[in-house]
């Protein structure tokens, strides 16, 4: 007698091998769904996740043609049904193969270790789940207690809207604590945008719940560390997982609470492979599990703000989220006063206005710290020939290369193409070529010259530091630079948006936005939203310890001082900003009123890329026209013509995209699933051979 069991197994498959994408295998013994196994694939043996067990051999395939699975990773209990569902939903929603999503949601080492090595790792794991002894937190403020009570009474999902410093993190911690007290098995997931920017939070969580109970999950961990965290979460030994977007896929069998801090942050959206939104998946996962979900922010995404709108008298039933508001800051620390500097009244082409320079001097003289925020885009210095108009273009990209003074190179920030600064203009031979525009590097230098005579209270000269992508390339560089700022070794900090994120700059009393205007008129409709969040965040982080002496201040240099965005900023009024943005978005039919997806194609020429998209569009239209229900779908979903991306060429690859937009999410998805079939078909046609890749981005961040 020879019994067989038939298994459908998810393995790492090429991106577009079909949304289903499971492979069939035979096993001599029964294996449960969710079990990790090793299976032969081509000449290799790879990790797989058992998705389904079938009682009969799959139709149309000779049973003898199916291969046997290899080892079963018995030391690891099967992934639960909810996890399989989460992955299945993600693959479908973001239009990728199941195998790709499933396998990339697992720690890479799991793929590489053989069962013997793995067994060795498993032995080292803390075995039992110890009850967590939480340290006592501070007494809650009234608004914190109120919010926690509402969370106990309602199902959510919740949008916790509260200024930086209003005590949101404390609410998360106490919610976790309450959960662990009520249910000794329960697990909680705390998600943050970028963990290396929030070491303070990690320390705070560990301090409250003990080092044993907490594990981290982010891309900065080594392979073994990630595996260890993953296993601890999977076995239930870890009660709290603190992680970045990838943590939304952590296997947590007892997950009861999910917190997404800074939920508006763009880094929750994965930008390659399956382009998932960890925030949106957190909400989905919460509903799937009956777990509570809290999204927190001082400047919520307009999506979440809109989802949490209250019902109104005109018949709008309101959104699906419950909005909780914490308007007051702990300790009543005042938000900085916002002052707009009208650049129309400053010297032409001045980078630093007279009022800003004056204020900087005053702060330095008083021994206080300042922070200058730069918008990097349009701020990187390009080399320019005044005679013939030559500029330092990248020959591989539709972008200019940037002048780096430190090693006298021209560097493309998109493809990395670098060479030495030419001695003379490559076009006309003019020796007098010069940088145009000022980068962070130049600003730092320029500032030093302008403030050369200013003295600190101890008589020393002003100390300026710059933090940006260039100064923080080395591991640990950002941390050590920030430590210098925190310890007071820096008077003026110059940097791009990365300095405004996640840090407590309690001793900084002046924040200045040098050139925020470009975001007001950007072709990217989310640019104003991002700018507002950035400035509010910078304002909220600064000056909490400013003391009685001087109130902290934010200076905004702008040519448009009466713009509604800056009016709202001056009053620290996110709801006013959101209302005006939503009015604009509604008028233009943009998200969150509508839903979008992008189809992108890359090729050696724009013609090929756009040709592929245009054919896809017309084929799809033809198909829908003749399909039952298709014409109605076409009415609900707009298919826009193919256009080049705003960064059209990168590393000699031409990029084009086509936008799909609909007021109905489900209609959009119906069309997308048809599109998938169309794309597979087209790709095999000889006239589209030149297409290097195509991808679908559902709910794209930028269009
Ligand atoms: P947010 O996450 O909204 O920025 P936090 O929870 O980090 O706010 O709180 C800001 C500061 O106030 C932190 O230093 C925190 O320890 C402190 N804090 C929060 N809640 C309380 C409270 N109820 N009593 C005393 N201090 C508190
Ligand atoms: Zn020239
Ligand atoms: Zn380039």
Image (cartoon, rainbow, N blue to C red):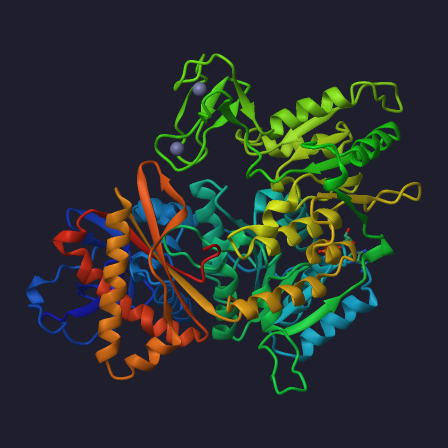
Picture quadrant where residue 396 is located: top left
Q: Is residue 274 above or below residue 396?
A: below
- The image quarter containing residue 2 is bottom left
* Image quadrant assignment for residue 654: top left
Residue 629 picture location, percent across and down: 29, 83
Establish if 675 lies above or below 341: below
Quadrant placement of the C terminus? bottom left
Q: Residue at x 21, y 79 (%)?
A: 626
Ligand 3, by image quadrant, is top left
* x and y, in percent, of residue 565 in the image: 69, 56
Q: Is residue 184 visible?
A: no
Residue at the image position 62 percent from the left and 63 percent from the top: 581
Q: Residue at x 37, y 36 (%)?
A: 397
Q: Is residue 77 left or right of residue 579?
A: left
Of residue 436 and residue 88, the one placed in the foreground of this image is 436
Q: Is residue 194 above or below residue 486?
A: below
Foreground residue among 377 and 109: 377
**x%, y% of residue 584?**
59, 66
- One can see residue 225 in this view: yes
Hey, which residue is sitting farthest right in the picture? 549
């Amino acid at each position: 007698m020879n019994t067989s069991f038939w298994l459908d197994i998810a393995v790492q498959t090429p991106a577009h091998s079909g949304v289903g994408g499971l492979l069939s295998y035979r096993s001599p013994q029964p294996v449960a769904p969710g079990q990790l196994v090793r299976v032969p694939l081509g000449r290799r043996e790879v990790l797989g996740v058992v998705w389904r067990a079938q009682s009969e051999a799959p139709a149309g395939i000779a049973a003898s043609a199916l291969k046997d699975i290899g080892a079963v990773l018995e030391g690891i209990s099967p992934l639960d049904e909810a996890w399989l569902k989460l992955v299945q939903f993600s693959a479908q929603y973001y239009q990728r193969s199941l195998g790709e999503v499933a396998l990339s949601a697992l720690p890479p080492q799991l793929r590489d270790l053989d069962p013997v090595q793995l067994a060795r790792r498993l032995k080292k794991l803390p075995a039992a789940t110890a009850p967590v002894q939480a340290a006592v937190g501070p007494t809650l403020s009234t608004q914190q207690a109120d919010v926690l009570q509402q969370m106990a009474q309602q199902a959510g999902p919740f949008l916790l809207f509260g200024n930086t410093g209003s005590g949101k993190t404390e609410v998360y911690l106490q919610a976790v604590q309450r959960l662990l007290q009520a249910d000794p098995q329960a697990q909680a997931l705390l998600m943050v945008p970028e963990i290396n920017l929030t070491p303070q939070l990690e320390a705070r969580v560990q301090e409250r719940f003990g080092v044993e109970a907490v594990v981290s999950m982010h891309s900065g961990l080594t392979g073994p560390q990630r595996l260890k965290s993953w296993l601890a979460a999977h076995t239930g030994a870890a009660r709290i997982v603190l992680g970045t977007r990838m943590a939304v896929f952590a296997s947590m069998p007892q997950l009861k609470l999910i917190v997404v801090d800074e939920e508006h942050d763009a880094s929750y959206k994965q930008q390659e492979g399956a382009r998932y939104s960890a925030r949106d998946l957190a909400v989905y996962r919460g509903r799937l599990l009956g777990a509570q979900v809290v999204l927190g922010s001082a400047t919520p995404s307009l999506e979440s703000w809109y989802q949490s709108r209250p019902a109104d008298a005109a018949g709008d039933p309101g959104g699906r989220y419950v909005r909780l508001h914490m308007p007051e800051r702990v300790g009543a620390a005042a938000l900085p006063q916002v002052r707009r500097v009208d650049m129309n009244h400053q010297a032409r082409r001045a980078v630093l206005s007279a009022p800003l320079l004056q204020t900087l001097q005053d702060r330095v003289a008083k021994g206080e710290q300042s922070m200058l925020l730069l918008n990097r885009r349009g701020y990187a210095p390009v080399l320019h020939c005044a005679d013939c108009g030559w500029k330092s273009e990248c020959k591989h990209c539709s972008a200019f290369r940037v002048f780096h003074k430190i090693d006298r190179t021209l560097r493309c920030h998109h493809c990395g193409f670098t060479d030495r600064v030419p001695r003379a203009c490559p076009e006309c031979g003019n020796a007098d070529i010069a940088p145009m525009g000022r980068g962070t590097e130049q600003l730092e230098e320029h500032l030093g010259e302008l403030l050369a005579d200013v003295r600190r209270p101890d008589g020393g000269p002003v100390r300026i530091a710059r933090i940006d992508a260039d100064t923080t390339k080395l591991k640990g560089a950002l941390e050590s630079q920030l430590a210098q700022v925190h310890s007071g070794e820096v008077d003026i900090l110059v940097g791009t948006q990365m300095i405004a994120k996640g840090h407590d700059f309690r001793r900084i009393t002046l924040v200045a936005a040098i050139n925020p205007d470009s975001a007001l008129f950007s072709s990217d409709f989310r640019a104003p939203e991002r700018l507002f969040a950035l400035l509010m965040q910078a304002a909220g982080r600064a000056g909490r310890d400013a003391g009685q002496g001087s109130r902290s201040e934010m200076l905004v240099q702008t040519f448009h001082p009466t713009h509604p965005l800056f009016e709202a900023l001056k009053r620290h009024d996110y709801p006013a900003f959101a209302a005006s943005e939503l009015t604009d978005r509604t008028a233009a039919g943009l998200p969150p009123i509508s839903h979008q997806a992008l189809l992108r194609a890359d090729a050696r020429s724009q013609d090929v890329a756009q040709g592929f998209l245009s054919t896809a569009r017309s084929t799809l239209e033809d198909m829908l026209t003749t399909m039952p229900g298709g014409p109605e779908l076409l009415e609900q979903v707009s298919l826009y013509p193919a256009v080049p991306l705003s960064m059209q060429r990168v590393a000699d690859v031409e990029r084009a995209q086509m936008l799909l937009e609909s007021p109905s999410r489900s209609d959009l998805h119906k069309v997308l699933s048809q599109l998938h079939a169309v794309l597979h078909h087209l790709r095999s046609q000889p006239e589209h051979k030149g297409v290097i890749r195509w991808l679908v981005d559902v709910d794209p961040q930028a269009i």
